[in-house]
Image (cartoon, rainbow, N blue to C red):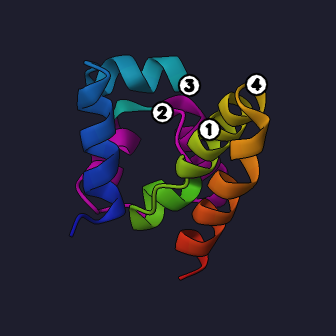
Amino acid sequence: MYSYNERIKELRKKLGKTQSQMAEEIGVSVDLISKIEQGQRSLSMSMLVLLAEYFDVSTDYILKGADTDYLMELGDLFSYILDSDKPKVKKIIKSILVSWLN
């Protein structure tokens, strides 16, 4: 299981950014990014929010690895369903809710 500092490093690398590039883009020092990624510096609330916005992920994902993007996917699914065959809507929504609540 990853810690938040490892997730931050992984997210940065997925963007193809160096610590220097990331630091410049979010307006902090390279030293701060380095210390956060190495687990030598904890995250302030404002830094957590800044990083979540930068990486376009939730704060939960950074802290716990919990992926809440499923809510956006669920919204997309409902939009698709509502634009399609209406009689199937109730059945599909019921199926989703039953599986989600179990």
Mark 3, secondary structure of its residue:
loop
Q: Residue at x 58, y 48 (%)?
A: 47
Q: Earlier in the sequence, mark 4 or mark 3?
A: 3
| Sequence-first tag of 3 and 1 | 3
- In the picture of the structure, the residue carrying the numbered disc 2 is 55
Q: Disc 4 versus disc 3: distance between alpha carbons? A: 43 Å
Give the label, 2 or 1, closer to the camera.
1
Q: Is residue 43 visible?
A: no
Q: Which residue position is annotated with label 4?
A: 83
- In this figure, which residue is indicated by the disc labeled 3? 27
Q: Distance between the Cα atoms at labels 3 and 2?
A: 14 Å
Query: Mark 2 packing: few (<14 Cα in 10 Å), some, or many (20+)?
Result: some
User: What is the C-alpha distance between the residues marked 2 and 4?
Assistant: 31 Å
Q: Measuring 25% from the left and 54% from the top, which residue is drawn there?
A: 6
Earlier sequence position, callout 2 versus callout 4: 2
Tag nearer the camera, 3 or 2: 2
Question: Which numbered disc, 2 or 4, marks the residue closer to the eye?
Answer: 4
Give how far across and how far down residue 10 sits, in percent.
25, 41
At label 1, counting other C-alpha atoms closer than 10 Å, the crowd grade (few under 14, some 14-19, many 20 or more) is few
> Which mark is nearer the camera, 3 or 1?
1
Would you say the magenta stretch is mainly helix, strand or loop? helix
- Give the extent of the magenta segment: 31-58
Q: Is residue 54 above or below residue 62?
A: above
Q: Residue at x 52, y 42 (%)?
A: 57
